[in-house]
Amino acid sequence: MQKEDGFMLRISKNASVTVSIILTALFCAVLLAAAFVLPDFVRLIASAALRPLGQRDGIVILFSGYLILFFALLAAFALIRLLFLVRVGSVFTARAVSYIRSVSWCAFVIALIFLGMTWYYLVALVLAFTAALLGLCLRVVKNVIEEATVIKSENDLTV
């Protein structure tokens, strides 16, 4: 670790990427564990619904939860692959842009699922907005990285 500005500790790039990979892998493990407790969680939150829930409603909510977990796992796996590209210095590549695009689409799909869940839980609207904002931010980052990739390719051809 290096000391910077007298108060801020900063770790190396490789250590930072490694920490990010580990945290993302742990997040994947939490998502997989959540798949096993999701039915109990749905039963627990059923009492907070906007209206009384029938069995069909519970199935819809459970299915929505599994869809959210699925797309969150897809996004996490894309992030891990992106982090491995960062580790080897291949950030400005079409593959990296593709991974960022995948994560942004996963965020938009999750936002749509949460938007549908507002029929049962109004607080899902906040989660839908948050996921949509994340997806939008990722689209902007994707566009920036994509443009940087084009510029890098042009510079590589020039030299």
Image: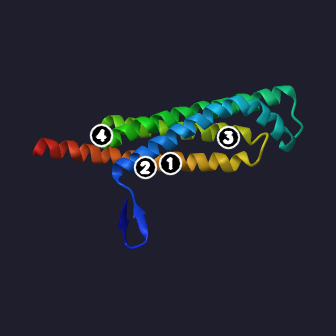
Q: Residue furthest right?
A: 52
Q: Estimate how packed mark 2 is, as few (under 14), some (14 to 19) or many (20 or more) residues with alpha carbons within 10 Å.
A: some
The circle on residue 150 is none
* Residue 32: % across, % down: 62, 31
> Disc 4, disc 1: CB below 8 Å?
no
Q: Which of the two discs, 3 and 1, labels the residue nearer the N terminus? A: 3
**In the rendered image, which residue does mark 1 sit on?**
136
Residue visible at 35% across and 54% down in the picture: 12
Identify whether 69 is placed above or below 22. Answer: above
* Residue 71: % across, % down: 57, 33
Q: Estimate how packed mark 1 is, as few (under 14), some (14 to 19) or many (20 or more) residues with alpha carbons within 10 Å.
A: some
**In the rendered image, which residue does mark 3 sit on?**
114
Type of the residue with mark 4 = Val
Type of the residue with mark 2 = Val
> Disc 1, disc 2: CB below 8 Å?
yes
Work out whether residue 50 can be spotted: no
The circle on residue 88 is 4
Work out whether residue 39 can be spotted: yes
